[in-house]
Image (cartoon, rainbow, N blue to C red):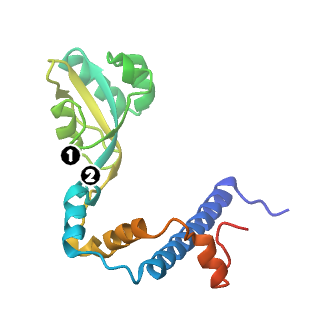
């Protein structure tokens, strides 16, 4: 019998999902364009929307981070040595970290950006790490030492007004549509299969 590994199935399902999602987004964009083509939006309103929602269009670099906190530099150096010898970061965090909250989660402190309420030394260390990399011991503001791991790194992106102007126009135009118009009506009228099933 032909053996198919579960990871192969997973990745082909993921691909299928991505294809479906792309189709869905494409359908949605076509729908929005058609429904809003006659609606005129004032340039000033577009610019104001961009200014008011600037944080949507300036996405900071985000790190998924793990942490092991030690009371002294020597203890932190010991932990680093164990990591370099192949010990698992999460296991060591549970065993050795003096930061109770993150220790119980295997050192996980979630997603960190420059806006996060986190010790500046941790953010600085993350900014110098590549994905999966582990820092040297860094001194925290309270005098303790931490070893930081950048589990995942997602590069930030900034969109200029001209890049998102069309998208903003669609958002504002969709808000002006009478609520009696629904996507279902549109698809039925154009004999297009309604994407989400009947």
> Quadrant of the image for the N terminus?
bottom right
Q: Nearer the viewer, residue 131 or 105?
A: 105
Mark 2: which secondary structure? loop
Q: Earlier in the sequence, mark 2 or mark 1?
A: 2
Q: Where does the image place residue 156, in percent across and percent down from the top left?
A: 27, 56
- Residue sitting at 38 percent across and 20 percent down? 101
Residue 16 is left or right of residue 141, and the answer is: right
Q: Where does the image place residue 159, in percent across and percent down from the top left?
A: 24, 66
Q: In the rendered image, which quarter is residue 48 located in?
A: bottom left
- Which residue does the numbered mark 2 point to in the structure image? 61
Residue 184 is left or right of residue 131, and the answer is: right
Q: Nearer the viewer, residue 138 or 108?
A: 108
Residue 94 appears in the rendering: yes
- Residue sitting at 28 percent across and 71 percent down? 164
Q: In the rendered image, which quarter is residue 36 located in?
A: bottom left
| Crowd tier of the residue under label 2, counting other residues whose Cα lies within 10 Å: few below 14, some 14–19, many 20 or above | some
Residue 192 appears in the rendering: no
Q: Considering only vertical position in the picture, is 148 above or below 22? A: above
- Residue sitting at 32 percent across and 73 percent down? 169
- Which residue does the numbered mark 1 point to in the structure image? 127
Q: Where does the image place residue 47, in percent across and percent down from the top left?
A: 20, 68
Measured in 3D between alpha carbons, the distance from the residue under mark 2 to the one under mark 1, in whole angstroms, is 9 Å
Mark 1: which secondary structure? helix
> Quadrant of the image for the C terminus?
bottom right
């Amino acid at each position: 019998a032909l053996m198919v590994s579960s990871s192969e199935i997973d990745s082909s399902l993921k691909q299928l999902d991505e294809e479906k999602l792309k189709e869905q987004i494409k359908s949605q964009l076509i729908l929005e364009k058609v429904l809003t083509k006659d609606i005129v939006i004032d340039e000033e309103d577009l610019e104001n929307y961009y200014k008011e929602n600037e944080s949507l269009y300036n996405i900071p670099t985000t790190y998924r981070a793990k942490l092991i906190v030690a009371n002294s530099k020597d203890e932190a150096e010991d932990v680093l040595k164990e990591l370099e010898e192949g010990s698992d970061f999460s296991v060591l965090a549970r065993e050795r970290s003096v930061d109770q909250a993150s220790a119980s989660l295997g050192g996980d402190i979630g997603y960190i950006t420059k806006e996060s309420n986190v010790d500046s030394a941790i953010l600085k260390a993350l900014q110098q790490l590549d994905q999966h990399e582990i820092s040297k011991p860094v001194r925290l503001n309270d005098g303790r030492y931490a070893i930081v791991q950048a589990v995942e790194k997602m590069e930030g992106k900034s969109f200029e007004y001209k890049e998102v102007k069309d998208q903003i126009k669609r958002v504002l135009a969709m808000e002006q549509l009478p609520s009696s118009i629904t996507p279902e009506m549109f698809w039925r009228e154009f004999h297009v299969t309604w994407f989400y099933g009947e």
